[in-house]
Image (spheres, rainbow, N blue to C red):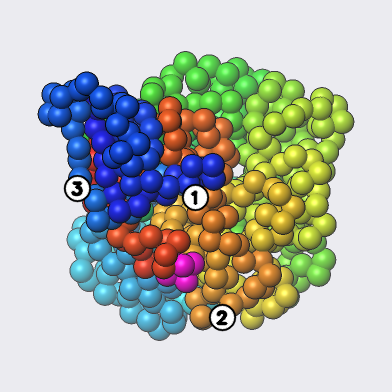
Amino acid sequence: MITVFTAKKIITMNPSWPDGTAIAVREGLILEVGTLDTLAPWLAGKKLGVDYEIDDQFEQHVMMPGLIDPHLHPMMAAVLLPMKFITAMKWSFPWDVAPATTTPQAYEQALIDAAAESDASEPFFTWGYHSHWHGEMNRTLLDGIFGDRPAVVWQRSFHEVYLNSAMIKLLAMDEEKARSRPQIDIDAGHFYENGLGYAIRHLNSIIMSAEWIEKGLQRLGKVVHFGGQTTVGDMAVGLFDFDREWRNVEEILDIPQAPYRVICVPHVVAVNAMQGDPDKGLAFIDALQARSKPNFRFTNKVKLFTDGAFFSQLAMLSEPSYIDGHHGEWLTVPEDYESLARLYWQNGYQIHVHCTGDLGLELALDTLEKLQWERPRFNHGYTIEHFGFSTPEQVQRIKALGAQVSANVYYLHELSAAYSEKGVGIERSSQMARVGDCVRHDIRVAFHSDFPMAPAMPLHSAWVACTRENCDGKVVSPNERLSLDAALRAITIDAAATLGIEAETGSLRSGKKADFAIMDLDPYEVGAARLKEIQILATVFEGVVHKI
C-alpha cells in the first residue's frame, strides 16, 4: 500500500529539490516528493483505497524532515526525570511546567515546599541547582531543611551532587574513605566529576531501580516525541551500568510503537572500568554491533572526554582562565586521553569527544593532529562535542584536521550573562558556541541538547543559533549568528551526518526513511526570530503517524 501524505508545504532540506506539497511512502520509505500531479506515475493503474491512499490530515500544516538530536543521554534523563525539577530557567514538559527559580531565597523556599508536598517516607531528589542563581549549597543547609529525611540535590550540570547527612547514612558511606578520594568534599556532602562516580555507585540502589528507571524512560520517550525528534544519539552508553542500561532500554524503549530510533555510542572509560583494562574494553565494544536492533543500534562510534562540566565552570581554560583564578578539571588526564584516542583511531572508530573549554579542545585537536600523522584517515568522523569555549585559531585547526562540531548552543542562552559576571568576563562568554565561524570555514555543524543539560527542543536550539539571544534578551556576538537555513540543517541533515546516517534520514528524498515533523508554521515564512514559537503537532516515523 502506498500512502500519499499531503501538506501545505513540505520542506525537504534537499537543495536540489527543496519543497513540495505531497510525499509518497511505501513500507516506511519515501518513494517521491512533489505534488499530487507529479506523483501520478506511482499511482497510475492502481486503485484508491486498495493499492494506495491519500492521507490529507496535514494538508493545512508544514512538514519537514524528522528532527534529530545527535547527543542526549537516555539513561541520565531516566535518572533525573522522576526528580523534582527546580531550575533557573523555565522548563516545559508534556506533563508539567517547572517555573523559573532565580534567587537563593526562592530556591530554598522551593526546596521546603517540594519537601512538604512529597512523600516524607521516601528520599527526596531534586535537579537543577546552580550556584549563580541559587547561592551556596552544602550538607549543613540540607540537614537544616530535611532533617532526618535523606535528600539529594543534583547540580544543573549532572556532574555534581550534594547529599545530606541522612542520605550519607542511608547509603552506608564510609566518610573517612570518601574524604581521601579526589573530587569529594564529604564535609560539604559534595561529590563532583570523578567523585560523582563514587556517589552514583552508592545511589544506584535507588536511582537504577526498575520502578525509577521505567518511569524515567517513559517520560523521556514523551520528551523526545514532544520535540519533534525521530532520531537521537545516546552519546555515552554505559555511564551508569552498561548491562542494566541496555536491559532497561530493550524492555522500555525498544518497542514497536516507539516513534524514534537511537544511535548508541559507548562510553569508553566506563566500559574500561567494567572490563578491567583498555584492550578488554575494546574487545567488548567491538562486539556491541552484534547487539544492534533496527532502531537501537551501535555503529563504529565511541565517546571520550577531555575536560569538566560547562555548567559547573569546570571546563579547562587557558590563561587568563576564570576570573577567580581556577582553571577547571580534567575528566581524562591528557596522557590517558591520547592513549585511548590512539587505540580507537588505530582500530577504525569514529571518535566523539566531550570538550567544553578551549584547553580541553586544544587537547582534542593536538591528539587528532598526532593521530593523523601516525595513520592518516579521511572522513574519520572525529567530532567535537559541546564546543563551549574556543578560539578562532582552533576553528581553523578543526577545519584543517577534517573534524566536525556538534554544539550545545543552549550554553549561550542560559549562561552567557551569568558567566560574564562570575566566570570568564564578557568577551569570552559572548563567544560561547562559536558556530558562525565554523560555518564560514565550511565545517559541518550540528546542534544537540545533551538532554537533560538543555531542553530537547531542536527548534529552540536553532532559534538560539540564529538570534544569539541570551536569557536577559541581549544579542551577543551577532557575527556568530547562523542563517535560518544553516540552523535548520544543523537539526536535520547535518545532525544526521554527525551520526553517520545521512543516507538514511535527515532530509526528504526518494529512498530515505519516511521520518517527518509536522509543524503549525513554516520556519521560512515566519523567520528565525519566531522559530521557538513553532509548535510540533505530530511526527511520522517510518511512515507511521504519531500525534503529540
Q: Which residue is mark 2?
A: 474
Q: Residue furthest left?
A: 49
How far is mark 1 from mark 3, CA to CA? 25 Å
Q: Which residue is mark 1?
A: 491
Question: Mark 1: few, some, or many residues within 10 Å (few <14, many ≥20)?
Answer: many
**Residue 194: mark in rendering:** none
Residue 306 visible in the shown view = yes
Please indicate whether residue 92 sits to the left or right of residue 475 in the image.
left
How far is mark 2 from mark 1, CA to CA? 24 Å
Residue 516 vertical placement versus 479 (above, below): above
Picture quadrant where residue 485 is located: bottom right
Going from N to C along the chain, the mark reached first, 2 or 3, is 3
Instruction: Find numbered disc 1 in the image and state the secondary structure of the residue it sits on.
Output: loop
How far across and how far down the image is residue 136, in percent?
A: 51, 75
Q: Residue at x 42, y 65 (%)?
A: 525
How far across and how far down the image is residue 41, in percent?
A: 32, 27
Please indicate whether residue 7 sits to the left or right of residue 131 in the image.
left
Residue bounds of the magenta highlight: 527-531
Q: Which residue is mark 3?
A: 57
Question: Mark 3: few, some, or many residues within 10 Å (few <14, many ≥20)?
Answer: few
Front residue (pair 189, 547): 547
